[in-house]
């Protein structure tokens, strides 16, 4: 219903009225007003073309134009689903906390995904085996086959807070992300990329896990949340204790500086040494008892 933010000093009928220019080679487009999602952010990252050096450097590094589509969704079952080129597998398994904690890699055999061209060139990670039937159906596989040379990854998660958020504010924990490369310079063939992303929005909103899978998924997530809360409390306690130690040290320093005679300072230092020695002995006795 609403596309772009229509920046000031740009004509309404100009294509640039829809885009936000982040840099010389990065543009964003915002849209909202569609069923099953809270909006959409398209990020167009272009290979540097603004000067001769950038053009030559892009030839050496083989940089290409990429389109990233980020969609916070309103409704989604508790699962994580990743389909990506094998070159992205390590990035997801190590850099994304939700994937690292929850997902297992599924072998993409020719028998299971017979409608997906060159299935061995993909990596598939999920914590819901049932999701493959819905998101890698015959229809979806045909759509992915049509854009196979442009496809980089698709990533669905109900736990966006487990990783670093994107630059744009996401108001939902449920989130879909797509990345495509080698864009058509004329843009004529790129419409299908957006159509695929939006068709997945509807597929995710309709998808229902079995009661057993849903129960197991919620149980695991609850356990993870409890552990995260424990770690947060532990970190808060550690910071509080550190602050108390710093305050006590500052207080002792003030007392020491307030002393006027060398004799009084010497007595203060001796008392401090006795206190530290007593503390060390108490700590050693505690270790011996535990041993």
Image (cartoon, rainbow, N blue to C red):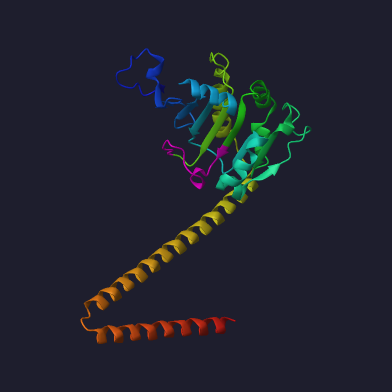
Task: Assign the C terminus to one quadrant of the image.
Answer: bottom right
**Foreground: 126 or 287?**
287
In this rendering, the answer to whether 283 lies above or below 94 is below
**In percent of the image, x 48 and y 81: which residue is there?**
283
| Residue span colored magenta | 156-171
By secondary structure, the bulk of the magenta-drawn segment is best described as loop
In this rendering, the answer to whether 181 lies above or below 232 is above
**Foreground: 18 or 266?**
266
Q: Position of residue 282 (x, y in %)?
A: 47, 84
**The image quarter in which residue 170 lies:** top left
Residue 65 visible from this viewpoint: no
Q: Judge left or right: residue 156 versus residue 2.
A: right
Q: How many marks?
A: 0
**Foreground: 69 or 226?**
69
In this rendering, the answer to whether 129 lies above or below 241 is above
Q: Position of residue 257 (x, y in %)?
A: 24, 75
């Amino acid at each position: 219903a609403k596309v772009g933010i229509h920046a000031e000093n740009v004509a309404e009928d100009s294509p640039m009225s829809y885009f936000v220019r982040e840099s010389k080679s990065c543009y964003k487009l915002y849209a909202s007003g569609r069923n099953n999602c809270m909006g959409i952010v398209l990020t167009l990252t272009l290979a540097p073309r603004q000067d001769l050096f950038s053009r030559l450097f892009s030839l050496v590094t083989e940089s290409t134009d990429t389109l990233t589509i980020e969609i916070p969704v309103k409704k989604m079952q508790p699962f994580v689903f990743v389909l990506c080129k094998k070159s992205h597998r390590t990035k997801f398994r190590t850099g994304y906390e939700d994937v690292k904690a929850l997902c297992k890699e599924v072998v993409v055999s020719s028998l299971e995904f017979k409608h997906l061209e060159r299935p061995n060139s993909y990596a598939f990670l999920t914590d819901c085996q049932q999701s493959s039937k819905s998101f890698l159906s015959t229809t979806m596989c045909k759509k992915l086959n049509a854009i196979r040379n442009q496809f980089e990854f698709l990533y669905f998660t109900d736990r966006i807070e487990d990783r670093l958020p994107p630059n744009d504010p996401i108001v939902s924990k449920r989130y879909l992300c797509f990345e495509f490369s080698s864009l058509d310079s004329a843009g004529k063939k790129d419409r299908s990329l957006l159509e695929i992303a939006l068709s997945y929005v509807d597929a995710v909103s309709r998808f229902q896990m079995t009661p057993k899978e849903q129960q197991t998924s919620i149980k695991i997530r609850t356990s993870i949340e409890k552990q995260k809360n424990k770690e947060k409390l532990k970190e808060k306690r550690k910071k509080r204790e550190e602050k108390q130690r710093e305050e006590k040290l500052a207080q002792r320093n003030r007392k020491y500086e307030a002393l006027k005679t060398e004799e009084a300072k010497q007595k203060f230092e001796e008392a401090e040494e006795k206190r530290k020695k007593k503390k060390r002995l108490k700590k050693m006795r505690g270790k011996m008892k535990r041993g």
